[in-house]
Amino acid sequence: MHSIRNEKRTCTDTGKIQHFLEQARIGFLGLSSEDIPYVIPLNFVWLNGAIYFHGAEEGRKVTYIEHNPRACFTVSENYGTITSPIPAKTDTAYLSVIIEGSLHQLTDLDEAMEAMQVMLDKYVPGYYDRPLGRSHLERYVSPLGSKTAFYKLTAASMAAKEKEAAMDRLFYEGKTVHTERA
């Protein structure tokens, strides 16, 4: 793992990182095969120190994973632009986490069910009146005719970086350098 160049932006608050990963909606999976990069946005869950996601059992993502299971997963949220009368000091408030590790397809249906239930609870909380059934995962076929594969990225390393929002300096529509000085 590479160190963060701007060390003052390093976030080491494990509670904050955990909460962030549990709440964030979209992550970006970075794969590489034969020196060709491929990055895709995904719904995901952070569970037991790993990223879980699902998708079709076939396609470009699966081919890349089969050729090279090493992956990088990035989650980032932009919290606004921090203004400054000095243009070079205008900045972005954010939190980002980069997780590196190896992917593997889940073969344990119980683990896949747990991850899928957490995913449903995250993205559609309270929508279903009963837990996910085992038969749903065993039999589901997408509209394109593909079965679903479940993947786990176990974190070999993780780095978090942040720039906290200075609430009084966040940009809002209509704010100008003149209103900030007033």
Image (spheres, grey):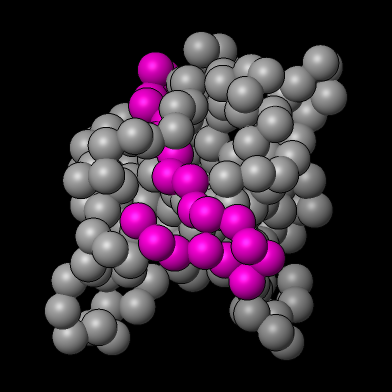
Q: Residue at x 26, y 53 (%)?
A: 113
Q: Does 66 sit above or below residue 129?
A: above
Q: Does 64 sit above or below residue 131?
A: above
Along the line of sight, the residue nearer the viewer: 101 or 77: 101
Q: Which residue is drawn at 54% across and 36% down?
A: 73
Q: Quadrant of residue 85?
A: bottom right
Q: Quadrant of the C terminus?
A: bottom right
Q: Can residue 49 be seen in this view?
A: yes
* Image position, residue 49 (x, y; %): 27, 33
**Is residue 99 rendered to the left or right of residue 61?**
left
* Image position, residue 19 (x, y; %): 27, 52
* Image position, residue 66 (x, y; %): 62, 24
Range of the magenta residues?
138-157
Along the line of sight, the residue nearer the viewer: 106 or 14: 106
Residue 81 is a magenta residue: no
Q: Which residue is drawn at 44% across and 33% down?
A: 105
